[in-house]
Image (cartoon, helix red, strand yellow):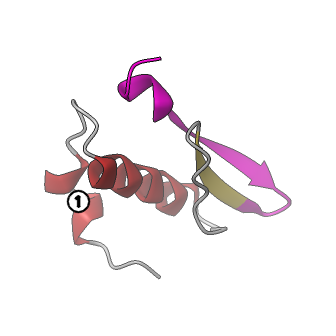
């Protein structure tokens, strides 16, 4: 399995909350806003250095972690 394949992110819903998850086992915080869960996933990908991730320069990188 290639390194990029180990970091495929997705979101799941649990009740009224949305969580970002990754195939590597990482799970983000429960969020009420799907957009925040997606931003968590983008930050995860940027943090592990996945090629093709532009999250470090996007608007999500400017949002504080709540």
Q: Residue at x 32, y 49 (%)?
A: 48
Is 16 on the left-hand or right-hand side of 45?
A: right
| Residue closest to the far top | 1
Q: Secondary structure at mark 1?
A: helix
The picture places residue 45, in percent across and down from the top left corner, at 35, 46
Q: Is residue 2 magenta?
A: yes
Q: Residue 6: x percent and y percent? A: 48, 31
- Circle 1 packing at 10 Å, graded few (<14), some (14-19), many (20+), is few
Q: Is residue 16 left or right of residue 57?
A: right
Which stretch appears magenta? 1-17
Q: Outermost residue, right direction?
A: 15
Q: Is 46 displayed left or right of 42 in the figure?
A: left
Q: Quadrant of residue 10?
A: top right
Label 1 sits on residue? 59
Q: Residue at x 61, y 69 (%)?
A: 29
Q: Nearer the viewer, residue 25 or 40?
A: 25
Give the x, y percent position of residue 55: 25, 49
Q: Residue at x 37, y 28 (%)?
A: 3
The location of residue 32, given as percent across then percent down, is 65, 68
Q: Compare residues 32 and 3 and report the one nearer the observer.
A: 3
């Amino acid at each position: 399995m290639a390194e990029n394949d180990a970091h495929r992110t997705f979101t799941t819903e649990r009740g009224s909350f949305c969580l970002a998850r990754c195939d590597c086992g990482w799970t983000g915080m429960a969020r009420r806003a799907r957009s925040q869960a997606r931003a968590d996933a983008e930050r995860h990908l940027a943090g592990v250095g996945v090629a093709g991730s532009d999250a470090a320069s996007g608007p999500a990188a400017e949002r504080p972690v709540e």
